[in-house]
Image (spheres, rainbow, N blue to C red):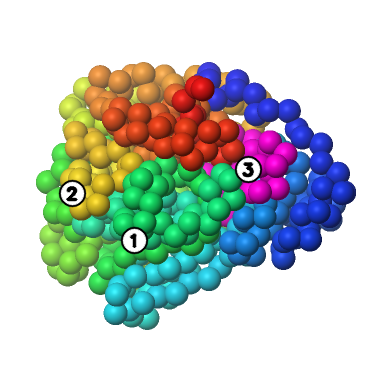
Amino acid sequence: MNSASHQSPGAPVALGAPDAEELRAHVAGPVLLPGEEGFDAELAGFELSVAHRPALIVGATGAADVIAAVRFAAERGLGVAVQATGHGISRPATGVLIGTRRMTGVRVDPQARTARFEAGVRWERVIHEAAVHGLAPLNGSAPFVGAVSYALGGGLGLLSRKYGFATDHITSFDLVTADGRLLEVTPERHPDLFWGVRGSKGNLGIVTSLEVRLFPVSRVYGGGLFFDAESTPAVLKTYLAWAPRMPEDLASSVFFTEYPDAEGLPEPLRGKFVTHIRLAHLGEPEEAERHFAELRAAGTVVMDTVASLPYTRAGEIHNDPPSPVASYSKTFMLRELDEKAVNLILKLAGPGSNAVHGVELRHLGGAMSRPPQVPSAVGHFPDAVFNAYIASLIEPETIESVDRAQQGFVDALRPWTTPGVCLNFLAGHNTSVEVARGAFTAENYARLRELKTRHDPGNVFRFNPNIPPLPA
Protein backbone atom coordinates (compact mmCIF):
# COMPACT_ATOMS: atom_id res chain seq x y z
CA MET A 1 0.00 0.00 0.00
CA ASN A 2 1.10 3.58 -0.54
CA SER A 3 3.40 4.77 2.21
CA ALA A 4 0.95 7.54 3.17
CA SER A 5 -1.27 4.88 4.65
CA HIS A 6 1.47 3.89 7.13
CA GLN A 7 2.70 7.32 8.10
CA SER A 8 1.98 8.23 11.70
CA PRO A 9 0.04 11.50 11.92
CA GLY A 10 1.58 12.21 15.32
CA ALA A 11 0.21 11.70 18.78
CA PRO A 12 -2.85 13.76 19.69
CA VAL A 13 -1.98 16.81 21.76
CA ALA A 14 -3.77 17.48 25.05
CA LEU A 15 -5.02 21.04 25.38
CA GLY A 16 -7.38 22.11 28.10
CA ALA A 17 -9.89 24.79 28.98
CA PRO A 18 -7.24 27.33 30.08
CA ASP A 19 -5.58 27.10 26.66
CA ALA A 20 -8.91 27.58 24.91
CA GLU A 21 -9.80 30.55 27.12
CA GLU A 22 -6.47 32.20 26.39
CA LEU A 23 -7.07 31.88 22.65
CA ARG A 24 -10.72 32.97 22.89
CA ALA A 25 -9.53 36.30 24.23
CA HIS A 26 -7.92 36.99 20.84
CA VAL A 27 -10.35 35.32 18.42
CA ALA A 28 -13.77 36.50 17.24
CA GLY A 29 -14.86 33.10 15.97
CA PRO A 30 -15.50 29.94 18.00
CA VAL A 31 -12.64 28.12 19.73
CA LEU A 32 -13.61 24.51 20.35
CA LEU A 33 -12.10 21.58 22.24
CA PRO A 34 -12.98 17.92 21.59
CA GLY A 35 -16.28 17.04 23.20
CA GLU A 36 -17.57 20.61 23.25
CA GLU A 37 -20.82 21.48 21.50
CA GLY A 38 -20.18 22.33 17.86
CA PHE A 39 -16.78 20.60 17.65
CA ASP A 40 -17.92 17.72 15.43
CA ALA A 41 -19.92 20.00 13.14
CA GLU A 42 -16.91 22.29 12.73
CA LEU A 43 -14.70 19.28 11.98
CA ALA A 44 -16.93 17.85 9.26
CA GLY A 45 -15.72 18.04 5.66
CA PHE A 46 -16.30 16.49 2.25
CA GLU A 47 -13.68 13.71 2.22
CA LEU A 48 -14.47 11.13 4.91
CA SER A 49 -11.64 8.65 4.36
CA VAL A 50 -9.21 10.55 6.60
CA ALA A 51 -10.31 11.92 9.97
CA HIS A 52 -8.72 14.98 11.56
CA ARG A 53 -8.04 14.63 15.30
CA PRO A 54 -7.17 18.18 16.29
CA ALA A 55 -6.51 19.26 19.83
CA LEU A 56 -8.41 22.46 19.14
CA ILE A 57 -10.42 24.06 16.34
CA VAL A 58 -10.56 27.76 15.53
CA GLY A 59 -13.51 28.88 13.41
CA ALA A 60 -11.79 31.88 11.85
CA THR A 61 -13.83 34.92 10.84
CA GLY A 62 -10.93 36.80 9.23
CA ALA A 63 -7.18 37.22 9.00
CA ALA A 64 -6.87 38.36 12.63
CA ASP A 65 -8.27 35.03 13.86
CA VAL A 66 -5.87 33.12 11.62
CA ILE A 67 -2.91 35.13 12.95
CA ALA A 68 -3.94 34.48 16.56
CA ALA A 69 -4.37 30.74 15.92
CA VAL A 70 -1.00 30.38 14.20
CA ARG A 71 0.80 32.28 16.96
CA PHE A 72 -0.96 30.16 19.59
CA ALA A 73 0.15 26.96 17.84
CA ALA A 74 3.71 28.19 17.28
CA GLU A 75 4.14 29.03 20.97
CA ARG A 76 3.24 25.43 21.83
CA GLY A 77 5.14 23.71 19.01
CA LEU A 78 1.92 22.48 17.36
CA GLY A 79 1.22 21.91 13.71
CA VAL A 80 -1.53 23.83 11.93
CA ALA A 81 -4.07 22.56 9.41
CA VAL A 82 -6.59 24.56 7.39
CA GLN A 83 -10.01 23.44 6.19
CA ALA A 84 -12.52 25.27 4.05
CA THR A 85 -14.65 22.48 2.54
CA GLY A 86 -12.54 19.42 3.35
CA HIS A 87 -12.17 18.22 -0.25
CA GLY A 88 -8.38 18.09 -0.14
CA ILE A 89 -7.85 16.49 3.27
CA SER A 90 -4.65 14.46 3.45
CA ARG A 91 -2.78 13.81 6.71
CA PRO A 92 -4.92 13.82 9.86
CA ALA A 93 -4.43 17.05 11.80
CA THR A 94 -3.44 16.54 15.45
CA GLY A 95 -2.59 20.13 16.41
CA VAL A 96 -4.68 23.20 15.64
CA LEU A 97 -7.28 23.11 12.87
CA ILE A 98 -8.34 26.46 11.42
CA GLY A 99 -11.73 26.36 9.76
CA THR A 100 -12.19 29.15 7.21
CA ARG A 101 -15.80 28.63 6.13
CA ARG A 102 -16.89 31.89 7.81
CA MET A 103 -14.46 33.89 5.65
CA THR A 104 -16.79 34.48 2.71
CA GLY A 105 -16.05 37.94 1.33
CA VAL A 106 -16.05 38.32 -2.47
CA ARG A 107 -15.43 41.49 -4.47
CA VAL A 108 -15.38 41.73 -8.28
CA ASP A 109 -13.70 44.60 -10.16
CA PRO A 110 -15.29 44.46 -13.64
CA GLN A 111 -12.96 47.12 -15.06
CA ALA A 112 -9.80 45.32 -13.97
CA ARG A 113 -11.45 41.93 -14.62
CA THR A 114 -10.40 40.59 -11.25
CA ALA A 115 -12.05 39.01 -8.23
CA ARG A 116 -10.78 39.04 -4.66
CA PHE A 117 -12.16 36.48 -2.25
CA GLU A 118 -11.48 35.14 1.23
CA ALA A 119 -10.26 31.72 2.30
CA GLY A 120 -13.67 30.12 2.91
CA VAL A 121 -15.28 31.06 -0.41
CA ARG A 122 -16.49 28.35 -2.76
CA TRP A 123 -16.21 28.81 -6.51
CA GLU A 124 -19.97 29.03 -6.90
CA ARG A 125 -19.92 32.40 -5.08
CA VAL A 126 -17.19 33.79 -7.33
CA ILE A 127 -18.96 32.48 -10.43
CA HIS A 128 -22.21 34.15 -9.34
CA GLU A 129 -20.61 37.52 -8.59
CA ALA A 130 -18.56 37.55 -11.80
CA ALA A 131 -21.42 36.46 -14.08
CA VAL A 132 -23.36 39.71 -13.76
CA HIS A 133 -20.41 41.38 -15.52
CA GLY A 134 -20.12 38.71 -18.24
CA LEU A 135 -16.97 37.32 -16.63
CA ALA A 136 -15.87 33.95 -15.27
CA PRO A 137 -13.05 32.60 -13.09
CA LEU A 138 -10.89 29.58 -13.87
CA ASN A 139 -12.81 27.28 -11.52
CA GLY A 140 -12.85 23.51 -11.57
CA SER A 141 -15.55 21.07 -12.59
CA ALA A 142 -17.17 21.14 -9.11
CA PRO A 143 -18.34 24.66 -8.15
CA PHE A 144 -18.74 23.71 -4.47
CA VAL A 145 -14.97 23.28 -3.94
CA GLY A 146 -13.02 25.89 -1.97
CA ALA A 147 -11.68 28.50 -4.38
CA VAL A 148 -8.45 29.47 -2.58
CA SER A 149 -7.15 25.94 -2.04
CA TYR A 150 -8.06 24.96 -5.60
CA ALA A 151 -6.25 27.94 -7.11
CA LEU A 152 -3.15 27.34 -4.98
CA GLY A 153 -2.96 23.70 -6.11
CA GLY A 154 -2.74 24.47 -9.83
CA GLY A 155 -6.34 24.33 -10.93
CA LEU A 156 -7.29 22.30 -14.01
CA GLY A 157 -10.79 23.31 -15.09
CA LEU A 158 -13.18 23.81 -17.98
CA LEU A 159 -11.38 26.91 -19.27
CA SER A 160 -7.80 25.75 -18.69
CA ARG A 161 -7.00 24.60 -22.22
CA LYS A 162 -7.85 28.11 -23.37
CA TYR A 163 -6.40 30.19 -20.50
CA GLY A 164 -4.09 27.95 -18.44
CA PHE A 165 -4.04 26.81 -14.84
CA ALA A 166 -5.92 28.86 -12.25
CA THR A 167 -2.61 29.43 -10.48
CA ASP A 168 -1.26 31.19 -13.57
CA HIS A 169 -3.79 33.99 -13.05
CA ILE A 170 -3.37 34.76 -9.35
CA THR A 171 -2.34 38.42 -9.12
CA SER A 172 -1.84 38.88 -5.34
CA PHE A 173 -2.72 37.40 -1.97
CA ASP A 174 -2.56 37.95 1.78
CA LEU A 175 -0.47 35.33 3.58
CA VAL A 176 -0.10 34.41 7.25
CA THR A 177 3.36 32.94 7.75
CA ALA A 178 4.48 30.27 10.21
CA ASP A 179 5.62 32.95 12.67
CA GLY A 180 2.22 34.67 12.59
CA ARG A 181 2.98 37.64 10.31
CA LEU A 182 0.49 38.90 7.72
CA LEU A 183 2.11 39.69 4.38
CA GLU A 184 0.68 41.24 1.24
CA VAL A 185 2.30 39.18 -1.51
CA THR A 186 2.61 40.37 -5.12
CA PRO A 187 5.14 39.82 -7.91
CA GLU A 188 6.99 42.88 -6.60
CA ARG A 189 6.55 42.33 -2.85
CA HIS A 190 7.93 39.03 -1.57
CA PRO A 191 8.53 37.62 -5.08
CA ASP A 192 9.92 34.33 -3.71
CA LEU A 193 6.67 33.66 -1.87
CA PHE A 194 4.62 34.83 -4.84
CA TRP A 195 6.35 32.13 -6.90
CA GLY A 196 6.27 29.37 -4.29
CA VAL A 197 2.84 29.72 -2.67
CA ARG A 198 1.23 29.59 -6.11
CA GLY A 199 1.32 25.86 -6.72
CA SER A 200 2.43 24.43 -3.37
CA LYS A 201 -1.01 24.44 -1.73
CA GLY A 202 -0.53 25.63 1.83
CA ASN A 203 3.04 24.50 2.46
CA LEU A 204 4.40 28.03 2.96
CA GLY A 205 1.59 29.75 4.83
CA ILE A 206 -2.14 30.34 5.06
CA VAL A 207 -3.68 32.48 2.33
CA THR A 208 -6.48 34.52 3.88
CA SER A 209 -7.55 36.30 0.68
CA LEU A 210 -6.66 35.93 -2.97
CA GLU A 211 -7.05 37.99 -6.15
CA VAL A 212 -7.43 36.31 -9.54
CA ARG A 213 -8.04 37.39 -13.12
CA LEU A 214 -11.46 36.87 -14.67
CA PHE A 215 -12.21 36.10 -18.31
CA PRO A 216 -14.90 37.22 -20.77
CA VAL A 217 -16.97 34.03 -20.66
CA SER A 218 -20.71 34.20 -20.05
CA ARG A 219 -21.90 30.99 -21.74
CA VAL A 220 -20.51 27.59 -22.60
CA TYR A 221 -21.88 24.98 -25.00
CA GLY A 222 -21.49 21.64 -23.32
CA GLY A 223 -22.77 18.84 -21.18
CA GLY A 224 -22.53 15.08 -21.20
CA LEU A 225 -22.84 12.35 -23.79
CA PHE A 226 -23.60 9.06 -22.01
CA PHE A 227 -23.02 5.83 -23.95
CA ASP A 228 -24.13 2.27 -23.19
CA ALA A 229 -21.70 -0.44 -22.13
CA GLU A 230 -21.54 -2.10 -25.54
CA SER A 231 -20.35 1.17 -27.09
CA THR A 232 -17.48 1.65 -24.64
CA PRO A 233 -14.62 0.17 -26.74
CA ALA A 234 -15.52 2.19 -29.84
CA VAL A 235 -16.28 5.35 -27.89
CA LEU A 236 -13.06 5.22 -25.87
CA LYS A 237 -10.91 4.62 -28.95
CA THR A 238 -12.70 7.39 -30.83
CA TYR A 239 -12.39 9.86 -27.95
CA LEU A 240 -8.68 9.27 -27.33
CA ALA A 241 -7.91 9.85 -31.01
CA TRP A 242 -10.34 12.79 -31.29
CA ALA A 243 -9.35 14.88 -28.26
CA PRO A 244 -5.75 15.76 -29.31
CA ARG A 245 -7.08 17.18 -32.60
CA MET A 246 -9.47 19.61 -30.93
CA PRO A 247 -8.94 23.40 -30.62
CA GLU A 248 -8.01 25.01 -27.31
CA ASP A 249 -11.48 26.43 -26.75
CA LEU A 250 -12.82 22.88 -26.33
CA ALA A 251 -12.28 21.06 -23.02
CA SER A 252 -13.23 17.43 -22.54
CA SER A 253 -12.82 14.29 -20.49
CA VAL A 254 -14.13 10.74 -20.51
CA PHE A 255 -15.32 8.90 -17.41
CA PHE A 256 -16.51 5.33 -17.24
CA THR A 257 -17.81 3.21 -14.41
CA GLU A 258 -20.64 0.94 -13.34
CA TYR A 259 -23.21 3.06 -11.54
CA PRO A 260 -25.05 1.69 -8.51
CA ASP A 261 -28.73 0.86 -8.72
CA ALA A 262 -29.59 3.80 -6.48
CA GLU A 263 -32.55 6.10 -6.21
CA GLY A 264 -31.86 9.61 -7.45
CA LEU A 265 -29.80 8.49 -10.43
CA PRO A 266 -31.32 8.98 -13.90
CA GLU A 267 -32.91 5.76 -15.14
CA PRO A 268 -30.44 5.29 -18.06
CA LEU A 269 -27.58 5.13 -15.53
CA ARG A 270 -29.04 3.09 -12.65
CA GLY A 271 -27.19 -0.20 -12.24
CA LYS A 272 -25.49 0.12 -15.62
CA PHE A 273 -21.97 0.52 -16.94
CA VAL A 274 -21.88 3.88 -18.72
CA THR A 275 -19.22 5.87 -20.54
CA HIS A 276 -19.64 9.61 -19.99
CA ILE A 277 -17.90 12.16 -22.22
CA ARG A 278 -17.87 15.66 -20.68
CA LEU A 279 -17.69 18.57 -23.13
CA ALA A 280 -17.28 22.34 -22.80
CA HIS A 281 -16.91 24.54 -25.89
CA LEU A 282 -16.45 28.32 -25.82
CA GLY A 283 -17.49 28.93 -29.43
CA GLU A 284 -20.80 28.88 -31.27
CA PRO A 285 -23.10 25.84 -30.87
CA GLU A 286 -22.91 25.05 -34.59
CA GLU A 287 -19.12 24.88 -34.47
CA ALA A 288 -19.24 22.75 -31.33
CA GLU A 289 -21.69 20.29 -32.88
CA ARG A 290 -19.40 19.84 -35.88
CA HIS A 291 -16.71 18.74 -33.44
CA PHE A 292 -19.09 16.57 -31.40
CA ALA A 293 -20.51 14.71 -34.42
CA GLU A 294 -17.63 12.23 -34.52
CA LEU A 295 -18.26 11.30 -30.90
CA ARG A 296 -22.02 10.97 -31.30
CA ALA A 297 -21.47 8.55 -34.18
CA ALA A 298 -19.17 6.30 -32.16
CA GLY A 299 -21.87 4.51 -30.16
CA THR A 300 -25.36 4.41 -28.68
CA VAL A 301 -26.16 7.54 -26.66
CA VAL A 302 -28.47 6.70 -23.74
CA MET A 303 -28.54 10.22 -22.30
CA ASP A 304 -27.56 13.59 -23.78
CA THR A 305 -27.32 16.75 -21.66
CA VAL A 306 -25.42 18.93 -24.15
CA ALA A 307 -26.90 22.43 -24.36
CA SER A 308 -26.02 26.12 -24.41
CA LEU A 309 -25.53 26.95 -20.74
CA PRO A 310 -24.96 30.16 -18.83
CA TYR A 311 -21.60 29.81 -17.15
CA THR A 312 -23.37 29.80 -13.78
CA ARG A 313 -24.59 26.29 -14.73
CA ALA A 314 -21.22 24.99 -15.93
CA GLY A 315 -21.05 22.64 -12.93
CA GLU A 316 -23.77 20.55 -14.61
CA ILE A 317 -21.28 19.40 -17.25
CA HIS A 318 -19.40 17.05 -14.90
CA ASN A 319 -22.26 16.97 -12.40
CA ASP A 320 -19.93 15.94 -9.57
CA PRO A 321 -21.80 14.69 -6.48
CA PRO A 322 -21.88 17.32 -3.70
CA SER A 323 -22.44 14.93 -0.77
CA PRO A 324 -19.53 13.86 1.49
CA VAL A 325 -17.91 10.53 0.61
CA ALA A 326 -15.12 8.24 1.74
CA SER A 327 -12.96 7.69 -1.32
CA TYR A 328 -9.60 6.31 -2.37
CA SER A 329 -7.83 7.51 -5.50
CA LYS A 330 -4.66 7.62 -7.54
CA THR A 331 -3.64 9.96 -10.34
CA PHE A 332 -0.98 10.06 -13.03
CA MET A 333 -0.33 11.58 -16.45
CA LEU A 334 -0.33 9.87 -19.82
CA ARG A 335 1.12 10.43 -23.23
CA GLU A 336 -1.00 9.63 -26.27
CA LEU A 337 -2.48 6.16 -25.92
CA ASP A 338 -2.15 3.51 -28.64
CA GLU A 339 -4.46 0.58 -29.29
CA LYS A 340 -2.58 -1.68 -26.87
CA ALA A 341 -3.05 0.86 -24.08
CA VAL A 342 -6.75 1.26 -24.84
CA ASN A 343 -7.26 -2.51 -24.78
CA LEU A 344 -5.52 -2.71 -21.40
CA ILE A 345 -7.76 0.04 -20.00
CA LEU A 346 -10.83 -1.80 -21.23
CA LYS A 347 -9.62 -5.11 -19.79
CA LEU A 348 -8.92 -3.60 -16.37
CA ALA A 349 -11.76 -1.08 -16.04
CA GLY A 350 -14.19 -1.57 -18.92
CA PRO A 351 -17.54 -3.38 -19.06
CA GLY A 352 -17.40 -6.81 -17.46
CA SER A 353 -14.12 -6.11 -15.66
CA ASN A 354 -15.80 -5.83 -12.24
CA ALA A 355 -13.44 -2.94 -11.53
CA VAL A 356 -13.71 -1.42 -8.07
CA HIS A 357 -12.90 2.03 -9.42
CA GLY A 358 -14.14 4.49 -11.98
CA VAL A 359 -11.66 6.01 -14.43
CA GLU A 360 -11.47 9.56 -15.75
CA LEU A 361 -9.13 10.63 -18.54
CA ARG A 362 -9.03 14.42 -18.79
CA HIS A 363 -7.57 16.09 -21.87
CA LEU A 364 -4.67 18.44 -21.14
CA GLY A 365 -2.56 20.50 -23.55
CA GLY A 366 -3.29 23.94 -24.88
CA ALA A 367 -2.32 26.77 -22.54
CA MET A 368 -1.52 24.27 -19.78
CA SER A 369 1.45 22.95 -21.74
CA ARG A 370 3.01 26.39 -22.14
CA PRO A 371 4.95 28.27 -19.44
CA PRO A 372 2.87 31.14 -17.99
CA GLN A 373 3.88 34.78 -18.27
CA VAL A 374 4.64 34.88 -14.54
CA PRO A 375 6.28 31.60 -13.45
CA SER A 376 4.97 29.66 -10.44
CA ALA A 377 5.79 26.41 -8.68
CA VAL A 378 3.17 24.53 -10.73
CA GLY A 379 4.78 21.82 -12.80
CA HIS A 380 4.15 22.28 -16.52
CA PHE A 381 4.59 18.90 -18.21
CA PRO A 382 4.35 19.45 -21.97
CA ASP A 383 4.46 15.73 -22.84
CA ALA A 384 1.29 14.99 -20.85
CA VAL A 385 -1.79 14.59 -23.06
CA PHE A 386 -4.24 13.17 -20.49
CA ASN A 387 -4.56 13.30 -16.72
CA ALA A 388 -5.72 9.94 -15.38
CA TYR A 389 -7.75 9.82 -12.18
CA ILE A 390 -9.03 6.57 -10.72
CA ALA A 391 -11.29 6.63 -7.69
CA SER A 392 -13.28 4.23 -5.52
CA LEU A 393 -15.80 4.59 -2.73
CA ILE A 394 -14.45 2.71 0.27
CA GLU A 395 -15.14 1.29 3.71
CA PRO A 396 -12.27 0.90 6.22
CA GLU A 397 -12.10 -2.84 5.57
CA THR A 398 -11.83 -2.42 1.77
CA ILE A 399 -8.88 0.01 1.62
CA GLU A 400 -6.19 -2.64 1.10
CA SER A 401 -8.04 -4.50 -1.67
CA VAL A 402 -8.94 -1.25 -3.40
CA ASP A 403 -5.33 -0.09 -3.19
CA ARG A 404 -4.12 -3.34 -4.81
CA ALA A 405 -6.63 -3.05 -7.63
CA GLN A 406 -5.85 0.60 -8.31
CA GLN A 407 -2.10 -0.02 -8.18
CA GLY A 408 -2.54 -2.84 -10.69
CA PHE A 409 -4.18 -0.38 -13.07
CA VAL A 410 -1.38 2.17 -12.55
CA ASP A 411 1.33 -0.44 -13.09
CA ALA A 412 -0.28 -1.76 -16.27
CA LEU A 413 -0.38 1.73 -17.82
CA ARG A 414 3.17 2.63 -16.77
CA PRO A 415 4.64 2.26 -20.30
CA TRP A 416 2.42 5.16 -21.41
CA THR A 417 2.90 7.43 -18.40
CA THR A 418 4.90 10.63 -18.35
CA PRO A 419 6.26 12.42 -15.25
CA GLY A 420 3.97 14.63 -13.24
CA VAL A 421 0.75 14.65 -11.22
CA CYS A 422 -1.82 17.38 -10.64
CA LEU A 423 -1.59 18.41 -6.98
CA ASN A 424 -5.34 19.06 -6.72
CA PHE A 425 -6.07 15.42 -7.55
CA LEU A 426 -4.15 14.25 -4.48
CA ALA A 427 -6.41 13.68 -1.50
CA GLY A 428 -6.99 11.16 1.26
CA HIS A 429 -4.46 8.39 1.77
CA ASN A 430 -2.36 8.92 -1.33
CA THR A 431 -0.73 12.22 -0.37
CA SER A 432 2.64 11.08 0.93
CA VAL A 433 5.79 13.19 0.58
CA GLU A 434 6.91 10.91 -2.25
CA VAL A 435 3.64 11.20 -4.17
CA ALA A 436 3.43 14.99 -3.68
CA ARG A 437 6.96 15.37 -5.03
CA GLY A 438 5.68 14.18 -8.42
CA ALA A 439 3.63 17.37 -8.79
CA PHE A 440 6.79 19.42 -9.41
CA THR A 441 9.76 19.43 -11.68
CA ALA A 442 13.03 18.52 -9.96
CA GLU A 443 14.22 22.14 -10.18
CA ASN A 444 10.99 23.55 -8.73
CA TYR A 445 10.92 21.00 -5.93
CA ALA A 446 14.47 21.86 -4.86
CA ARG A 447 13.57 25.55 -4.83
CA LEU A 448 10.39 24.87 -2.82
CA ARG A 449 12.34 22.95 -0.17
CA GLU A 450 14.68 25.90 0.19
CA LEU A 451 11.70 28.25 0.61
CA LYS A 452 10.09 25.87 3.10
CA THR A 453 13.32 25.78 5.11
CA ARG A 454 13.48 29.58 5.16
CA HIS A 455 9.81 30.35 5.87
CA ASP A 456 8.60 27.27 7.79
CA PRO A 457 11.67 25.46 9.20
CA GLY A 458 9.56 23.72 11.85
CA ASN A 459 7.09 22.39 9.26
CA VAL A 460 4.19 24.02 11.09
CA PHE A 461 2.11 23.64 7.92
CA ARG A 462 2.52 19.88 7.53
CA PHE A 463 -0.98 18.45 7.35
CA ASN A 464 -1.05 18.63 3.55
CA PRO A 465 0.67 17.07 0.54
CA ASN A 466 3.80 18.03 2.38
CA ILE A 467 7.07 19.52 1.16
CA PRO A 468 9.42 19.00 4.13
CA PRO A 469 12.10 21.53 5.03
CA LEU A 470 15.72 20.59 4.50
CA PRO A 471 17.38 18.90 7.47
CA ALA A 472 19.24 21.22 9.82
Residue 77 on the magenta span:
yes
Q: Name the element at disc 1.
A: strand
In primary-sequence order, the first of circles 2 and 3 is: 3
In the rendered image, residue 240, in percent from the top left (x then y), is placed at 21, 39
The amino acid type found where label 2 is placed reads: Gly
Pick the front one: 29 or 407: 29
Marker disc for residue 255: none
Give the CA distance from mark 2 to mark 3.
Answer: 37 Å
Magenta-highlighted residues: 70-92
Residue 80's disc is: 3
**Mark 2 highlights which residue?**
366
Per the image, the residue denoted by label 1 is: 171
Q: Is residue 428 visible?
A: no
Q: Label 3 amino acid? A: Val
Which quadrant would residue 38 be assigned to in this image?
Answer: bottom right
Left or right for 447, reference 46: left
Please determine whether, in this image, residue 257 is positioned above or below residue 44.
Answer: above
Residue 169 spot, x, y in % from top left:
30, 58
